[in-house]
Amino acid sequence: MNFSEKFRVKPGNTIRLAKIDAAFKDKHEDQSSTLAEMENYKKRLRDLQYLLYAENKQSLLIILQAMDAGGKDGTINHVLGSMNPQGTRVYGFKVPSAEEASHDFLWRIHQAAPHSGQVSIFNRSHYEDVLISRVHNLIPKKVWSKRYDLINDFEKNLSDSGTHILKFYLHISKDEQLRRFKHRLDDPTRHWKISESDYREREFWGDYTKAYEDVLCKCSTEHAPWFVIPADHKWFRNLAVSQIVVATLESLKMEFPKPTIDIKKVREKYHKAEKEANN
Ligand code: ATP
Ligand code: MG
């Protein structure tokens, strides 16, 4: 199945998240039937990122948003895990610092945008400024309601400058969130991940859902599409995200740069050195 098509939010389309099955797993029973396909994606991700880095002309920005315990960390680990760390970066956006808050909301985001040849992943992003800010009335409606257009313009600017943008909403069900909270409680090595705010925010599930639906409808564009990824099954989430990232990188028509030196002459030098070394 072509996940880029299936999960992409068409610009302007209305989304009702409650109608999207978070436990969708396509034709697969379980993870075992996907292992070979996954291995193939990992290899292609590595090769394509190497090419992006070598070509050094365009860049890739992956934005991850989800409810708490939605699997952002796991996705990052999985998708970036097969790439060369030298050409990749991860940025986590938390509550803005005093300095960040004293600038416009896109200031800290713009600084983290990838430079050419690089893959960047945002763990949360400027979308928090129309999600948590809206849900908790941190700013007036007349301010946040203007931000959708500002975000679209900002992303268009990045896109026009050679940054390809993919935005993933990792869609988990409310039941699955609770299962993951329990898993964290039961596993002492995960206790550090638990925060009171997870439970507090869960009470606002409905408000967050509404805020996400507006984001998906207003900010999925041709140049920076949103994808709603069924994420109750971690292995399916990884499969879908990997396939979409691979397909996007493959569509970029990247090429290795032409050598700046005369390879024939260098080869002659090499043979001379080899001969000397053997004498
Ligand atoms: P995990 O899922 O592993 O808990 P996390 O991304 O939730 O990781 P936390 O430190 O728990 O990391 O939470 C970061 C918090 O910062 C979130 O509650 C998020 O909503 C908040 N945040 C991020 N950006 C903004 C913003 N622009 N304004 C207000 N709050 C923000
Ligand atoms: Mg958290």
Image (cartoon, rainbow, N blue to C red):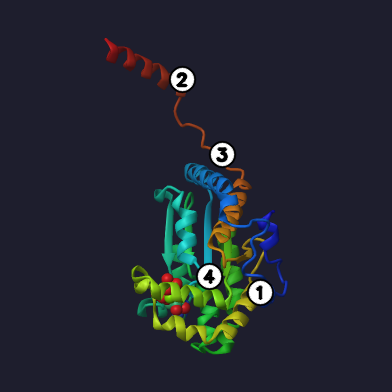
Q: Distance between the residues labelled 2 and 3?
A: 21 Å
Label 3 sits on a secondary structure element that is loop
Mark 4 or mark 2, which is nearer to you?
4
Apparent side of residue 224 relative to residue 98 in the rendered image (left or right) = right
Label 1 sits on a secondary structure element that is helix
Say what amino acid the circle numbered 4 marks. Answer: Gln
* Residue that label 3 marks: 255
* Residue that label 1 marks: 218
Q: Residues within 10 Å of mark 3 (few under 14, many from 20)?
A: few
**Residue at the spot 28% in from the left edge and 15% down from the top edge:** 277
Mark 2 or mark 3, which is nearer to you?
3
Do the residues bearing badges 1 and 3 touch, measured as CB atoms within 8 Å? no
Label 4 sits on a secondary structure element that is strand
Do the residues bearing badges 1 and 2 touch, measured as CB atoms within 8 Å? no
Say what amino acid the circle numbered 3 marks. Answer: Glu
Residue 62 at least partly seen? yes
Apparent side of residue 165 relative to residue 95 in the rendered image (left or right) = right
2 or 3: tag closer to the N-terminus: 3
